[in-house]
Image: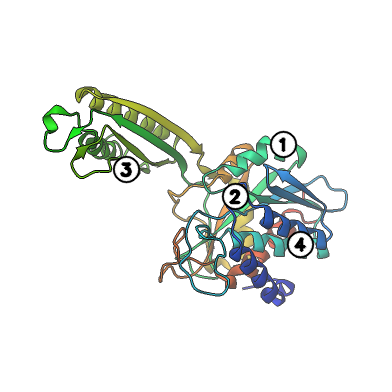
Amino acid sequence: MKLIADIVEKQATHTQWRRTIHAHPELAYAEHRTAQFVVDKLTEFGIPIEIGIGRTGVVGTITKGSSDRCIGLRADMDALPLQEHNEFEHRSTHDGVMHACGHDGHTTMLLAAAEYLARNRNFEGTVHIIFQPAEEGEAGAKAMMDDGLFERFPMEAVYGMHNWPGQQVGKMATRKGPIMAAMDVFEVKIIGRGGHGALPHLAIDPILIATQLVNQWQGIVSRNVNPIDAAVVSVTQIHAGDAWAVIPTEVILRGTVRSFKPQTRELLRERMKQLTAGICAGNDCEFEWWYDHRFPPTVNAAAETDAAAAACRAILGDQNFNGDVEPSTGSEDFGYMLEEKPGCYVFIGNGSADGGCLLHNPRYDFNDEIIPIGASYWVELVEQQLAPGRGL
């Protein structure tokens, strides 16, 4: 690996930054301490900043020379509503909140890169360093855009990165086109007629109807979606009843739907609602329907993916870069940014997923060993794309 020596030498300091952020996790749009940590560091580096973009977002701007070339680098800051089960010293100090997705590491890698870029400026143009709130299901990317992110900070391309457990340390990956799925969420309330559990013929049992729906919705993926298209329908919550011998009046089903193609996304929504209406009508009950298109798919642009690939190869070597990784049915609100600007989203290996270190696991922890890799990637990307004399 050809990592940047100045960044490698500061790994202990960067690790402390990351663990400080990890110990003080904050949920979507409440990243006040984290944002202040970012502001303090950027100010220390001499980087002009603007705060409060998308409520708690921060943007720093680093400029060299008179070139109008400009790119954006983005990291997310928020944590998850999850109780941490780790026992190490930097574990979460906030009950029910933890950095279980590595946003503490993402923030640190971008801060480390910002420090180096500000002090060396081996490029010609402008880099906007974007620290985004509320990635975890709350569309902080869109909130920043609604606050004028791209109008206030013009950029020709924007880039993102996520750590990936199960991918070896020292390896990175991406692909052209869709790399992460669209995310939709739903809630369906089935309204039957409650009654005695011993006299079901006098009731309309919403639990029985709910189980039919769960089964029928799975048939959409297996029988309505083109087999070569990826799609997921997952019911993740069922809420009903509170007594042994009472058939409840209502059941609430909640869950998530994932897809890559717009036509598949619409098919899933329409068929779910059709099946819900048909099954409820056939069982003489009512339903309430709520369905939200939450995140678009994350779709990498060709030229910007080539740029990201060149930076990955420069620091890791060809053998440690995969330019055609399988897309994930996980989702990212960075997809909103890529709808407006060309760009690329890459995965950076976080090491073995053994021992419960998968994303969103209560024993997950970001691997501090990869901080200099991610920071070096950011710097290499900037220095390649904004090399003096390089045009669009």
Q: What's the CA distance linking mark 2 and mark 1? A: 21 Å
Query: Closer to the observer: label 3 or label 2?
Result: 3
Amino acid marked by disc 3: Ile
**Mark 4 touching mark 3, by CB under 8 A?**
no
Residue 269 % position (x, y): 38, 31
Residue 249 % position (x, y): 27, 32
Residue at the spot of label 1: 148
**Mark 1 touching mark 3, by CB under 8 A?**
no
The first of marks 2 and 4 along the sequence is: 4
Amino acid marked by disc 2: Cys
Q: What's the CA distance linking mark 1 and mark 3? A: 39 Å
Residue at the spot of label 3: 238
Query: Closer to the observer: label 2 or label 1?
Result: 1
Residue at the spot of label 4: 41
What is the secondary structure assignment of the residue under circle 4?
helix
* Residue 18 in view of the camera: yes
Task: Give the class, few, some or many, for how many residues have Cα within 10 Å of label 4's Cα (few <14, many ≥20).
Answer: some
**Mark 2 touching mark 4, by CB under 8 A?**
no
What is the secondary structure assignment of the residue under circle 3?
strand
Instruction: Residue lying at the far right in this picture: please name it.
Output: 66
